[in-house]
Structure formats: structure tokens, C-alpha cells
Image: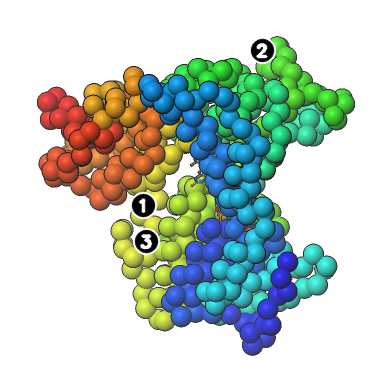
Amino acid sequence: MSEAPEIQGNGTYDVIVLGAGPVGQNVADRARAGGLSVAVVERELVGGECSYWACVPSKALLRPVIAVADANRVDGARQAVTGRLDADRVFARRNRYVTDWDDGGQAQWVKSIGADLFRGHGRLDGPRRVTVTRDDGGQRLLTARHAVAVATGSRPVLPDIPGIEEARPWTNRRGTDSSTVPARLAVVGGGVGVEMATLWQGLGSQVTLLARRRLLPRMEPFAGDLVTQGLTEAGADVRIGVQVAALRRPDPTGPVTLTLDDGSELEADEVLFATGRTPATGDIGLDTVGLTPGSWLDVDTTCLVNGVDGDWLYALGDVNHRALLTHQGKYQARTAGDAIAARAAGRPADDEPWGDHATTADQHAVPQVFFTDPEAGAVGLTAGQAADAGHRIRTVDLDFNAAQGANLYADGYRGHARLVVDLDREILLGVTFVGPGISELLHSATIAVAGEVPLKRLRHAIACFPTVSEIWLFLLAAYQRD
Ligand SMILES: Cc1cc2nc3c(=O)[nH]c(=O)nc-3n(C[C@H](O)[C@H](O)[C@H](O)COP(=O)(O)OP(=O)(O)OC[C@H]3O[C@@H](n4cnc5c(N)ncnc54)[C@H](O)[C@@H]3O)c2cc1C
Ligand SMILES: NC(=O)c1ccc[n+]([C@@H]2O[C@H](COP(=O)([O-])OP(=O)(O)OC[C@H]3O[C@@H](n4cnc5c(N)ncnc54)[C@H](O)[C@@H]3O)[C@@H](O)[C@H]2O)c1
């Protein structure tokens, strides 16, 4: 770890950022670009959970699994796949993408933007004040002229069930940094759990995925159904509608036994819980500014925390619970960083919907991809959410094999698409794609939803022949025909 920098004038900065994950880094960058001095406080690795134990390692591990599955869907290429994945090479690839859990490069980047990096645990100490406690116990007090931005992220939640500690379950950390493949892995949870099940099954584990509701419960129901089908065909045992009632692992080096709520038992070599997240706000001094420790931080459209006097405390990324996604947190960080700079210069924030300092897309157009096989991607509202919100809607559903491009991409391409159309405005409220290779297609839907592009105009956005994107032509034609 590098030494803390010489403190600028009594430790006073324009902006102090708590947490140097992707979100903290982005708000620091935008505030610096706005001419402000910035201190960044990080207690672990610069780059955060995303870089070392979440998005980056999980996608580095998943990509070889999906690449082989894709090759197996193309006659002629399938014959070239003659062996199994080389797990050691896959782990080596993952290690390269997480730079062997060394954050030197990212710490250097923080310095390169002209921000000062303080290593240690940051805590609010009343309005605009932050103490940084280093591992050796040393403390520093920093003061912010304009803003403190909290970007401390989230941690996994483990359910309170008998034997959970004795079982020593994996969470996203071991699920992404392990370099050994457990022979039998039980995965609990149908969100992140689907990616964990996909990658460990692909690497050679016999995976049992346990979900109390359908998989991917926040997406259209067909997404979970198709992913269940894909996992089952890959050899995983997917059990829906079950809960873990108790765990035991009397021998710490031996297997773990799960008792399920139907009374049955399941033995595995490891168990991984992916059952939700809690904000990393339990020990950041929220009580010193009138907020509840451990709570999600409620924010306005510029990411200012509601209920704090003086308009100085911002919360971005996972901690504000808007959307626990790196790209959405970075959008909030860019927006809030610019808002902080504008306010510091005495200019009003442009916080009208879709304004420069408003995070309007958080309400209307959040995209998300699950990198499973098939991939599942969605933006905006599901049909159920749109109806609940009072919109007059029509859905348009099509299987992807309507498009020749999809069939050329994969023999017997299997996938499904849904549009959710706002009948009053004739724009799209939501789009869901499930199928091989759709992750790169989703951005077209995000543009249509965020841009509120009228369907009449969208018809003029032509997809190249023969690509998977041609599904757009068929979806729009089906809408017009009906
Ligand atoms: C397995 C998994 C896979 C995922 N895959 C994706 C994906 O593919 N795409 C996607 O968009 N999202 C994905 N996510 C979600 C994504 O990881 C988070 O949304 C993202 O990490 C949030 O970024 P953040 O900067 O808010 O928090 P984090 O990345 O958690 O960073 C917070 C930082 O703050 C530091 N910190 C915390 N408290 C303090 C303190 N008191 N003082 C100093 N520093 C502190 C931490 O050490 C950490 O470095 C995934 C999540 C998981 C669990
Ligand atoms: N590709 C991506 O974009 C990606 C990948 C992974 C994670 N993430 C983000 O990370 C966040 C956290 O993911 P997550 O999956 O941990 O949380 P989640 O809230 O999305 O899903 C938790 C799942 O666990 C289940 N569950 C909860 N308690 C349970 C219990 N006691 N027993 C059995 N099942 C239980 C829930 O029903 C749900 O299916 C998500 O919000 C997601 O946005 C994104």
C-alpha cells in the first residue's frame, strides 16, 4: 500500500469521496474535471468489489464457458470442441483481469487525475468532516468545503438460518476468487446465483441451484424459464420453490449438508449464498449527521441525500439502492460529480427530468444483462411493472428464430423477445431479450427506451441483414400488424 499524500492545507478539500470502487472513482474524476480538489478514501482495494470480486472476475470466468457453448451451437465448429474447459487457464485469465488483486494501477489512476488517495477506513464525523483510520490505528481528519460523496457499496446478506456460520458458505468473494473447482456446489439464490451456477457448472462442478421463487424474479417470467432450461441442459440441477432450513458441517474440511424446507437433505462440497445485499453504511458515522447506521441512503435526482441539512452529502452507487449495477452507479457518479461542480461554482443544478444533473434514467431506463447461457437482458419496465404503474400497454412477443440472422448465428437459435409498448404515447417502456449473444443487442433497446423514440420513427432504424438485430424488424412489424 502506498503512503497517504501530504495533506492539502489542513486536510481541507472541495470534495471528499468515501470508497474508491467504480462509482467513487467516477465521481472523483468528474469533480476534478470541474476544477475541484478531491480526496478519495479507500479501506481495501482501489477498484472496489466490482473490479476484484464481482463484475470483472465473474465475466472473465463466464466468457470461456459461453464461448464453448456458442461454438457447440454451430455445426462445423462443434466438431472442433473436443475437450473440456481448462479450468486452470480460465483461472489464470481471471487473475489477469483482476491484476492478481493488486490495485497499484488503479491507485495510480486516482493520482493521475490529480486526486489525493487516503488508505484507511473513512467515517463521517459531523457535517463535512471525515476521519480516516489507517490499519496501524493512525487517524487523519479531512474537511470538505462543498461535498462528501458516499460510494461505499454493498455487502452480501446471509440468511439467519441454523448452522450458517459452521457451514462457512461462499459469497460473491469465494465465488469469484476461488482457483479450485468444488466437485459438488450448492448455489442458493436466483439473481447473481444464475451466473454463479452457469460458471461453476461450466468449470466442472455438479451444481444444484436452489431458488425460492423463479429464477431472475425481476425480469419477465420467460427470462427465468429459458435460463432454467439452459442450466438444466448444461447439467445443473435447478430446484425452484425450495428454501434452505438448516446447514451443518461438523468437519470443517468435510462436506456441507443442507436441510431443505421440504425435509430433504443435500450434500455438497461447498455452498454459495447469493441472497441479496446490504449497504456498507454500518460503520461510516451516519449517526453523526442524523442518519441511521446501516441504512440505504435515500437520494434526490442529483444524488443529494434527503434529510441532511446544508446540501453537502451525496450517495452514489449501491448505497442508494436505486439499481445495484456498476454502469448505473457510474452514471449517477458522472451526474452528481457535475452537479457538485456546478453548485460549487454557484450555478444552479440542471435537475429537471433528463437534465444534465438529473439521474432520470434510474427511473425509466435501467439496462441489465445476466451473462448466462442463454443471456438475459432487459431495460425499462416489464409488462407487470408497466401495468402496475397504470400505463395502457400492449406487449409484442416473438421467438428470435423469426430472424434469419439469429439462425445463422446459432443453429436452432433459441431465444425470445418482448416489447412493452405505451399505447398512449406509442413509445417503448421496456424491452427484454433472452438468447445467445443478446448482451450486445441490448443497447439498441436502451437507446429506444431512454430516447422515447416513437415507434413510427423506430421503423426507420434498419437492422443489417443477416444479424440477430433483425428481430427489431419483426417485432415492429408484429406491432403494426396487430
Ligand atoms: C457476483 C457479482 C457480479 C456482478 N456483476 C455485475 C455486472 O456484470 N454488471 C454490473 O453492472 N454490476 C454487477 N454487479 C454489481 C456491482 O458489483 C455493483 O453494483 C458495484 O460494485 C457497485 O459499485 P460501488 O462503487 O457502488 O461499490 P463497490 O464496488 O462495492 O466499491 C465500494 C468501495 O468502497 C470501499 N469502502 C467501503 N466502506 C468504506 C469506508 N468506510 N472507508 C473507505 N472505503 C470504504 C470498499 O472497500 C470498496 O472498495 C455484480 C455484483 C456481484 C455481487
Ligand atoms: N450481470 C449483472 O448485472 C449482475 C450480476 C450479479 C449481480 N448483480 C447485482 O447484484 C445485486 C445483488 O444480487 P443478488 O442476487 O445477491 O440479490 P438479488 O436481490 O437480486 O437476488 C437474491 C435472490 O436470493 C433469493 N433469496 C433471498 N433470500 C433467500 C433465502 N433465505 N433462501 C433462498 N433464496 C433466497 C431471492 O428470492 C432472490 O432470488 C443485484 O441487485 C444485481 O443487480 C448484477
Task: Say if mark 3 contacts mark 2, CB within 8 Å.
Answer: no
Q: Which mark is residue 361?
A: 1
Q: As shown in the figure, which amino acid type bears the numbered disc 1?
A: Ala
Look at the numbered disc 3 and give the secondary structure of its residue: loop
Q: Nearer the viewer, residue 449 or 102?
A: 102
Whole-percent x and y of residue 332?
45, 59
- Foreground pick, 68 / 6: 68
Residue 189 in view in this figure: no
Tell me the quarter of the picture where residue 342 sits. Answer: bottom left
Q: Determine the residue positioned at 47% across, 19% down.
A: 229
361 on left or right of 81: left
Residue 442 horizontal/vertical position (percent): 34, 41
Is the residue marked by circle 3 packed among few (<14), some (14-19), or many (20+) residues within 10 Å?
many
- Determine the residue positioned at 68% across, 25% down: 185
- How many marks the image carries: the answer is 3
Name which quarter of the figure residue 439 lies in. top left
Q: Is mark 1 within 8 Å of ligand 1?
A: no
Between marks 3 and 1, how big is the CA–CA gap?
8 Å
| Mark sitting earlier along the chain (1/2) | 2
The residues bearing labels 3 and 2 have C-alpha atoms spaced at a distance of: 48 Å
Q: Position of residue 363 (x, y in %)?
A: 38, 48
Quickly name the residue at label 2.
262
Q: Nearer the viewer, residue 149 or 20?
A: 20
> In the rendered structure, which amino acid carries the disc numbered 3?
Ala
Please name the residue that numbered disc 3 is placed on.
358
User: For the residue marked with disc 2, what is the amino acid?
Assistant: Asp
Q: Callout 1 environment at 10 Å: few (<14), some (14 to 19), or many (20+)?
A: many
